[in-house]
Amino acid sequence: MLHAYTVPSTTTTCPTPSVPVRARWHILFLAGVWAMAIPAAAQEANTWYFGARAGLDFNSGTPVTLLDGMMMSYEASGSISDANGELLFYTNAGRVMTSVPYRYGNVYDSNHNVMPNGDLELSGGCNSAKQGALIVQDPGNTDHYYIFTLDCAEHGVVGGLRYCEVDMTLNGGLGDVTSIANPLLSDVTESMIGIRHANGFDVWVLVHGLDNSDYHAFLVTAAGITGPVTTTIGPMVDDQPGDMAVNLTSTKVHYSSTNNSILLDFDPSTGVLSNLLDLDRNVVGCAFAPGGQYLYTCEFLGTKRIFQYDLLAADILASEQIITAGGNAGQPSLRLAPNGKIYVAHWEQDHLGVINNPDAQGLAADYQYQGVALLGRNCNAGLPEFVNDLLIPFTAAIADAPSVPTIQCMVTGDELLIRFGADMAQGRLSIFRSDGTLMHEDGMRSGQATIPIAWFAAGHYVVRLTTNEHSATGAFYIVR
């Protein structure tokens, strides 16, 4: 529409930790055998196109403004790159029937031409849906992509949730849209997010029902799209604009609209939501910090204040801090970026705001209203959507106390790089297989360690560091 994670205790035996999957791997099938895959450091979320021909390139770690985009979008946008950060395609979900120049909906290839069959005029999607475009790679075919689209309030959201398909082996490797407007569900709002399943491969596509309290989670697997899993929880939601957000560990979801600010637990194994907390604000934009401790929301009306909540606080509602008075432009959107910062789009501005240190408390988060210049292009009211674990190149987990830093686990080839903050520099480092088998144990005497893992079998592994005062846990996957 326009305008606690529980940390396993330290014992002398090998416990079976209950830890959600955090890492993302891109599976490669080579010569008939499963090979070691490219790990979470892949770069699929590094190129953004959005708004009125605006764009950013995050491949260097610092956003570089792009001026070659051809897309016009009020809000909805989705971009996807390959594992090396090279653009594959982008889209605005569909046209707004009554608006010029936003009455065009297309899928654009890496040369910024409309893909064959990429005219989305009849797709049922709309570029004025707040989170109206989400690109999901097929878990069973790295050349096959789904584009999920939503309709907008201007159309009465009659198009609902639909999907298109893209085959990147066609058109000389530039891609071809092979099907459009495949219906999944009617009567949904403008909000949609992609959440990695607990198995590390499949993807949940989560939407909210219209004029009800239903969340619907569809599961994308190698066998296709199934669902939905429906959870009825919280207040009734209408077609007012708003965003959803999910943390990197796929365990927390926030839903925002002009009437709601709702925090929920999410089970990445089942797609079920629970444990509602009403933050009692009228907000639109929302995003989680990469470390998972802090949630940010932004007002729809008034001064567009940005709020920070500490999810490790005993009283989350009471932990609210205002980190900025915001700007005077409407309909903000907040998105975590691959560089670990959170970017903020305000309606029809030629710049993005940025939260430079989102894992820091209060004003130390350092919000800049004019953070990135778009060099004459406008961001409008939306930023690209990505499956959550594509947005940061390491795993993340909430530790057992606010003062304890997040673990970072990053797989590079046959080595696991583990980083801790200064407070956790000394302690006992343990790696467990998911069945509780102790795979590695050593003393930790600095803020990082490199562990050889070539001999580890495929599966889910838990990393734990224990000191005299704290313990912290992360996780990673190996696919062979």
Image (cartoon, grey):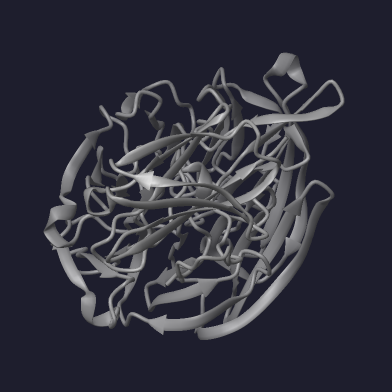
**x and y percent of residue 382 in the render?**
41, 49
Q: Position of residue 21 (x, y in %)?
A: 58, 55
Displayed quadrant of residue 241: bottom left
The part of the image, by quadrant, that contains residue 294 is bottom left
Q: Residue furthest front?
A: 12
- Decide: is 102 above or below 277: above
What residue sits 64% from the left and 79% below the top?
231
Most extreme residue toward the right is 32
Q: Could one spot residue 147 in this view of the protein? A: yes
Please indicate whether residue 38 sits to the left or right of residue 345 in the image: right
Q: Is residue 94 visible in the rendered structure shown here?
A: no
For this rendering, which residue is in front, 432 or 162?
432
Task: Tell me which residue sits at (28%, 83%) in the image.
Answer: 315
**Residue toward you, 38 or 467:** 467
Q: Quadrant of the C terminus?
A: top right
Tell me which residue sits at (34%, 43%) in the image. 340
- Indicate whether 226 appears above or below 66: below
Q: Would residue 61 be found to the left or right of residue 229 on screen?
A: left
Q: Is residue 295 left or right of residue 430?
A: left
Q: How many marks?
A: 0
Q: Observer-nearest residue: 460 or 428?
A: 428
Q: Residue at x 26, y 43 (%)?
A: 349
- Measured from the top left, where is residue 396 in percent x and y? 43, 52
Front-most of 332 and 58? 58
Q: Is residue 21 left or right of residue 185?
A: left
Residue 206: image location, x then y, percent: 60, 63
